[in-house]
């Protein structure tokens, strides 16, 4: 069995409610082991056998059957997550700055030649990898951090198209997933 990490997109918003205990039980009934959820926003670590496409198919079907709605799932292997943690670019940030760190996880590879507008001191694109984008969002006068993120990511969605699957996570959550 291998370790896998699943990031569920758009749950616990509106009518798409899902209790994490029920999600754990749902995945365990599919033969997945060591199922652990992190936060209530659809972050799951588990052990399972199979390829990424077969595991994703299992998750998609099980969640849809159990909860009555489809959920988009971005999947990473244990090795991929370890590489993300080990090679992140956040060390270059000012440790005293009032900011949040985020990773956008893409399901498919990101479009070739993707250029995103960097806004130093506001929302900065630290690095674009084949399936991840690392961002820093600085605190705004209104107290929010990620306001304006949609505008920064607009070129991604224009280039990738409407059906592009991705989901963003706060770096603190990503770190918790490997503990």
Image (cartoon, grey):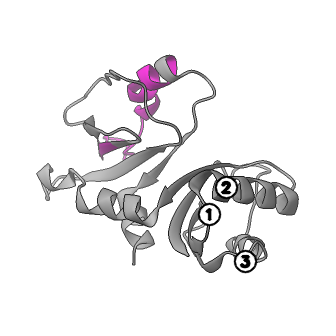
User: Is 94 positioned to the left or the right of 138 in the image?
Assistant: left
Number of marks in the image?
3
Q: How crowded is mark 2: few (under 14 residues within 10 Å), some or many (20 or more)?
A: few
| Horizontal and vertical percent position of residue 50 | 62, 63
**Residue matched to label 2:** 54
Disc ID at residue 28: 3
Q: Are marks 3 and 1 in contact (CB under 8 Å)?
A: no
* Residue at image coords 31%, 52%: 101
What is the quadrant of residue 18 in the picture?
bottom right
Q: Is residue 36 above or below residue 108?
A: below
User: Is 136 positioned to the left or the right of 177 in the image?
Assistant: left
Q: Is mark 1 on a helix, strand or loop?
A: loop
| Horizontal and vertical percent position of residue 3 | 50, 71
Nearer to me, 100 or 143: 100
Q: Judge whether residue 112 can be spotted in this image.
A: yes
* Residue at image coords 69%, 50%: 13
Tell me where the magenta segment starts and ends, as one range: 134-158
Q: Which residue lies furthest to the top in this view?
A: 158
Q: How crowded is mark 1: few (under 14 residues within 10 Å), some or many (20 or more)?
A: few
């Amino acid at each position: 069995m291998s370790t896998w990490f699943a990031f569920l997109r758009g749950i616990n918003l509106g009518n798409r409610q899902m209790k994490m205990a029920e999600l754990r039980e749902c995945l365990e009934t599919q033969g997945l082991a060591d199922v652990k959820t992190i936060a209530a926003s659809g972050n799951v670590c588990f052990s399972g056998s199979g390829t990424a496409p077969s595991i994703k198919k299992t998750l998609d079907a099980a969640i849809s059957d159990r909860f009555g709605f489809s959920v988009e799932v971005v999947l990473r292997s244990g090795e991929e997550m370890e590489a993300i943690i080990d090679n992140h670019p956040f060390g270059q940030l000012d440790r005293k700055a009032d900011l949040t760190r985020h990773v956008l996880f893409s399901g498919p590879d990101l479009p070739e030649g993707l250029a995103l507008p960097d806004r130093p001191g506001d929302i900065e694109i630290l690095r674009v990898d084949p399936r991840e984008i690392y961002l820093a969002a600085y605190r705004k006068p209104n107290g929010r951090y990620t306001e304006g993120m949609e505008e920064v990511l607009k070129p991604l969605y224009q280039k990738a198209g409407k059906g592009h699957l991705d989901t963003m996570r706060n770096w603190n959550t990503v770190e918790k997933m490997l503990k």
